Image (cartoon, helix red, strand yellow):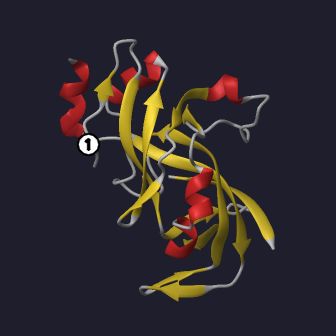
Amino acid sequence: RTVAQRYDVGELKKPVRLDNGWLRVDGLLTRSGVFPYRNADGSTRLEYRPPDEVFRADSLESFALVPFTNDHPPEVLNAKNTKTYAVGSIGENVRRDGDHVRAQILVTDAATAEQMMGGKVALSCGYSCDVDMTPGEVGGVRYDAVQKNIRGNHVALVDIARAGPAAKVRSEEHTSELQS
């Protein structure tokens, strides 16, 4: 059993700018599937995140109320360092939405809200998981390992989402709505 820290890169309701400058947005955080991860030696390993693990009740619940960050922090978040990196939080209602995980995000940092309005909209989950080194194939795609026991640490606003272009906070057509 290998325990690993993972940073996973997840349309949505119209964003709402609150009177105090905060931004409330709906986000697709991630999805199940096969994703590439870099090994310590620089090589790539394909890891399968099966739906029965991604959408497990305890996995979804572990992302409720976690910090929202602008890019991934250089360390795992905890009670001693979260204040340094948090720019908001994920809502309580983290749920399955088709092939994705959906949640509401509250952005409390003005600079991050402005970056989102400017087009930085991709999401990436920071989490820990157990990595089962059993290879296999799903839907014609081979994988080297399976992620199990996924536990959320944070969700980051990033430039490119590992989980694909759908893993984001909003579509580009909402940009003008945010600027008003």
Observer-nearest of 142 and 116: 116
On screen, residue 122 versus residue 151, left or right, reads: left
Observer-nearest of 85 and 96: 96
Q: Secondary structure at mark 1?
A: loop
132 in relation to 112, above or below: below
Residue under label 1? 171
Q: Residues within 10 Å of mark 1 (few under 14, many from 20)?
A: some
- Of all residues shown, which one is farthest toward the top? 20
Please give the name of the residue rendered at 38% of the width and 25% of the height, measured from the top-left corner.
23
Answer with the quarter of the image where residue 71 lies.
Answer: top right
Expressed as whole percent of the image width and height from the top left, the position of residue 85 reads 64, 27
Expressed as whole percent of the image width and height from the top left, the position of residue 49 reads 55, 70
Expressed as whole percent of the image width and height from the top left, the position of residue 53 reads 58, 71
Answer with the quarter of the image where residue 68 lies.
Answer: top right
Residue type beneath disc 1: Ser
Number of numbered labels in the structure image: 1
Expressed as whole percent of the image width and height from the top left, the position of residue 109 reads 49, 20
On screen, residue 65 versus residue 116, left or right, reads: right
Please give the name of the residue rendered at 63% of the width and 79% of the height, measured from the top-left corner.
144
Report whether residue 42 is seen. yes
Q: Tell me the quadrant of the picture where the C terminus can be found.
A: top left
122 in relation to 83, above or below: below
107 in relation to 54, above or below: above
Please give the name of the residue rendered at 45% of the width and 56% of the height, measured from the top-left corner.
95
Report whether residue 43 is seen. no
Q: Tell me the quadrant of the picture where the N terminus can be found.
A: bottom right
